Amino acid sequence: MSKRLSSGASLGTDLTSGSVFSQLVFFSLPILAANIIQQLYQTIDMIVIGKFVGSTGTIGVSVGGQAAILFTIIAIALAGGGQIYISQLMGARDKEGIQSAIGTLFTTTFTVSIAMMVLGLVFSKDLLRLLNAPPEAMSATSDFMRITCLGFPFIFGYNAVCAVLQGMGDSKRPLIFICAAALINVVLGVIFVGVFKWSTVGTALATVIAQGFSCMFALVYLFRHKDAFGFDFKLRRFRVNRKHLRVLLRLSLPMLMQNGLIIITLMYVNSLINAYGVVASATNSIGDKVFTFASISTQSLSTAGAAMIGQNLGAGKPARVKRIVLSILILAASLGVLSIAMSLIIPRQIFTIFSDDPAVIEYGVKYLRVSVITFILAALMSPFFALVNGSGFALLGLLVGILDGVVFRLGLAWLFSSVFTLGVPGYWLASALARLGPLIVCFIYYASGKWKTRKLLVDVPKTGVLTDSP
């Protein structure tokens, strides 16, 4: 029988009591900051390689990075599944379950990372050909991807440790780790590319070394606080528990398919837009970057909210779950209004930051007007998707991926481009409306209340029977 933690045990952060709104704000802020920093240092990578190497280097980093994403979404899926499971175990105060789940997550993640590293090294050029990497940039792109593949164990390991920390209510340490990685990456990138003239090899090496240090910092922190976090790092703890592995895969595989469908269909739609010429391609690329920055806040709220929901469901407190959902909605809507206002009031100024081309700037106005729909749907979807993830309903998450990536994005792209002949704005409109189907499905799940009676991934403690008490 699993050991239960006493209420006074020092283990992560208890997100099952106290002010929901303030907890959500303070828990999500470090996640938001970490995501912003990650985007910023990736942007700096592009600036450094573009300044010192030129277009060939830029293409190498861009296309090589796209290829690597197809592997790293596996790390993200495993981490996402681990965070949900551990958050519910944390809410249920199941110490033995947490230790065994962490060991299973670490061993599984490391094994998969080695397999992905080997596959990436062997099939790198084949994958780059599928992505239509320009022949003149193939050497630089291949070098970048192969070195990046060597860093997969660090990427997977870092994500796994952060999943453990966030699932247990600690979002501050992952921020510290990503800050360290960003600083190391930027400094080494300038030295390797600007001083040593190592081109894309230098950028890739800087990234891998930074990821290695970040992963090491995270593991050292977990080891030094092993008593507080309930994982003693004994060899037997790394033994794969079949029960925990089944739960982890049941959560992670649908997440992987969901993210894969969305990313692949988005890349396909982007390739269709690229066929319209340089102005359309540049506008779309800049627009994607702008939207990524603008949507970081709602994504961070959803990530934080999922961990909070997982803990409260594990503790048998559905009334707090409702308040968490409402709090996410209020915050996401407020941030969405800000993004909408900037898109409508200063669209030219936003695009001027990235381009001096008058044609791209004017086309960017159209992009941001369409993006208003995206901001509205993303804000509305954030709280309900957090509930889907926090409750561990991975199959519904897969349905969301199918609706978003295949049914709506590809279906509407064909409708607007082929039937209504809207051209590039039609593709933008299709991507914006792709979230409509998932929003409806996730809201119905919330409104139905079935998440209250859904069988959890863990056993709810007898003192926390599912009731509407706070």
Image: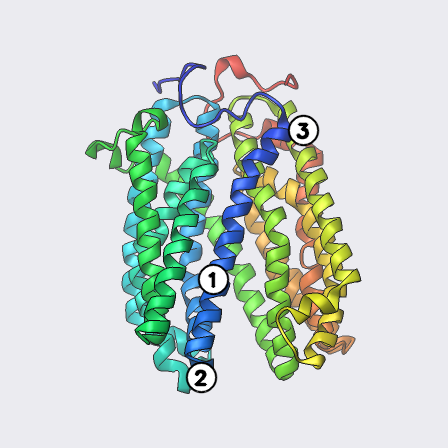
> Residue tagged by mark 3?
323
Q: Residue at x 39, y 73 (%)?
A: 127
In the image, farthest residue toward the left: 235
User: What's the amino acid at mark 2?
Assistant: Pro
Q: How far across and how far down the image is residue 382, in percent?
A: 64, 45
Name the foreground residue: 426 vs 290.
290
**In the rendered image, is residue 19 in sight?**
yes
Label 3: how many Cα within 10 Å (few below 14, some 14–19, many 20+): some
**Is there CB contact under 8 Å for labels 2 and 1?**
no
Label 1: how many Cα within 10 Å (few below 14, some 14–19, many 20+): some
Q: Could you give the CA–CA distance between mark 2 and mark 1, rounded to whole angstroms?
A: 22 Å
Above or below for 450 versus 184? above
Left or right: 114 as drawn, with respect to 28: left
User: What's the amino acid at mark 3?
Assistant: Arg
Q: Could you give the CA–CA distance between mark 3 and mark 1, rounded to whole angstroms?
A: 35 Å
Question: Where on the picture, by quarter, is residue 72?
Answer: bottom left
Q: Which label is found at residue 134? A: 2
Q: Residue at x 37, y 41 (%)?
A: 161
Q: How far across and how far down the image is residue 461, in percent?
A: 48, 17
Left or right: 298 as drawn, with respect to 117: right
Quadrant of the drawing holding the N terminus: top left
Quadrant of the drawing holding the C terminus: top right
Above or below for 400 versus 122? above
> Residue tagged by mark 1?
42
Q: Could you give the CA–CA distance between mark 3 and mark 2, rounded to whole angstroms?
A: 51 Å
Name the foreground residue: 402 vs 298.
298
